Image (cartoon, rainbow, N blue to C red):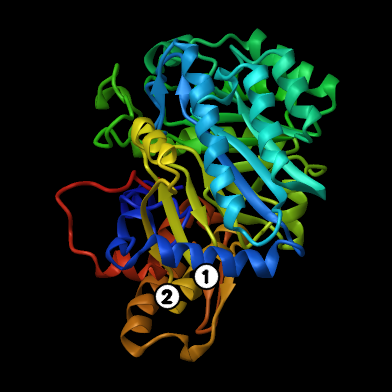
Amino acid sequence: MTHSLIARYNVAGPRYTSYPTVPFWNTAAFTTHDWQQRLTTAFATSNYTDGISLYIHLPYCESLCTFCGCNKRITRNHGVEEPYIDALLAEWELYCDWLPERPRIAELHLGGGTPSFFSPHQLRRLLTGIFRWADPVSDPDYGWEGHPNNTRFEHLQTLYSFGFRRVSFGVQDYDPAVQRAIHRHQPFANVERVTDQARAIGYTSISHDLVFGLPFQQRSSIQNTVAQTLRLRPDRIAFYSYAHVPWIRGTGQRGFQDADLPDADQKRALYETGRALLEAGGYSEIGMDHFALPHDALYQAMQTGALHRNFMGYTTARTNVLIGLGASAISDVGTAFMQNEKEIGAYQKRIQTNELPVLRGHLLTPRDQFIREQILNIMCRFETSWSADDWTETEWDAIDRQLDAMMADGLLDYNHTHLRVRPAGHPFLRNICMVFDQYLAASSVSQQPLFSQTV
């Protein structure tokens, strides 16, 4: 990849876990009543065909990882577990009280924070309460995120007993200098232990999360980290680009200077090094930042065109209803998004008053839904199609001009009704999606940054 391409396309841009992206939600036109109506409509048409997805945000961590941009609370006080689980169950009961039927949960994900911060007992209490009001489908897809340092055999066994067959472990990088900078002290032995335990219990998809672009990261540390990872041979690997967003409150991205980060050319070289090693090890690139072995469901979904992307990341299932429980969790019903209160105290207070903890939301217009499909197609299948009359002349002029330039750079092929991303364009998926983003195109330049760099 040439320096000129990186310089041209390394701009701030969204990761497109949603469209419109959260900064462009029309919150003024959103009401909780509208949200409930759209959720009820989507639920009625899909619960007994596809089931629903459920995301549960468990925001606590015992220590701060300084690369992390997630919504979390740092504490060693495990007395917070019980009241937070109480709030989650009360929120779920609010939903189930007014939904017309018992939800059938096709997809369930425990994210964080650190879900393994919670004791096996509290996780058992949470899931027992969830399934008191709901039923699983015949072939569910349940996964959770564990920290190798505090995940115990009992965690793995408890969640397995509730139908969880996927688990992802945060690795990031094995280099001691990098680990010191990001405050993530994690020996390989811990990762090996939990990976072996998960396999012995019967988990069918184990994932390791790696990150490139971290402070003090060198080509040699990526080579060593991937080599260690290949020894354990997880079924899938997330190889994320470090998102440097220190302006976002609560990220805790400190303990290193901007000068300690690799520049754009160096960062991309780290990815290319890792990608080459992973592909040589038998992994295939799936969408953006993900790799999987041929037997894994994520790879198979990519091959069949069933791969989907939502607020939980890449998934093999596409349901019309995703309900998010917990502080900052986001729900998606296809025609509307809703985010819960982000602060844990505010979230719990709203639950105690028997109301949904709605912070903000967006009602998708038909135009939003059309463009969202284009972006999902690009992110999940590397191609998309449309009709010639789907765009106004002004819109198409702007899109055509940008796609022409990208085609000249060798990133994609397209005509007036179809686009296909070339392998050389895979590192620039975010940039390609930005071409279709009507909110981004109409926005004025903000003095406050909104997104991390795309490369």
Task: Determine the residue located farthest toward the left in the rendered image.
Answer: 447
Which amino acid type is shown beneath numbered disc 1? Gln
Residue density around tag 2, few if under 14, some if 14–19, many if 20 or more, within 10 Å: few
Please tell me which residue is depicted at 39% across the width and 63% down the height of the picture.
362
Depth check, front residue: 354 or 38: 354
Please tell me which residue is depicted at 34% across the width and 71% down the height of the picture.
438
Quarter the C terminus occupies: top left
From the top left corner, tell me how far across and down residue 242 is, in percent: 42, 34
- Secondary element under disc 2, as helix, strand or loop, is loop
Residue 312 in sight here? no
Reply above or below: 29 against 94: below
**Residue 144 location, quadrant:** top right
| Side of 188 where 77 appears, left or right | left
**Residue 333 location, quadrant:** bottom right
| Side of 212 where 97 appears, left or right | right
Tag of residue 365: 2
Q: Which residue is mark 1?
A: 374
From the top left corner, tell me how far across and down residue 117 is, in percent: 55, 18
Reply above or below: 157 against 392: above
Which amino acid type is shown beneath numbered disc 2? Thr
Reply above or below: 246 against 118: below
Viewer-nearest of labels 1 and 2?
Answer: 2
Reply above or below: 296 against 419: above
Please tell me which residue is depicted at 34% across the width and 45% down the height of the picture.
453
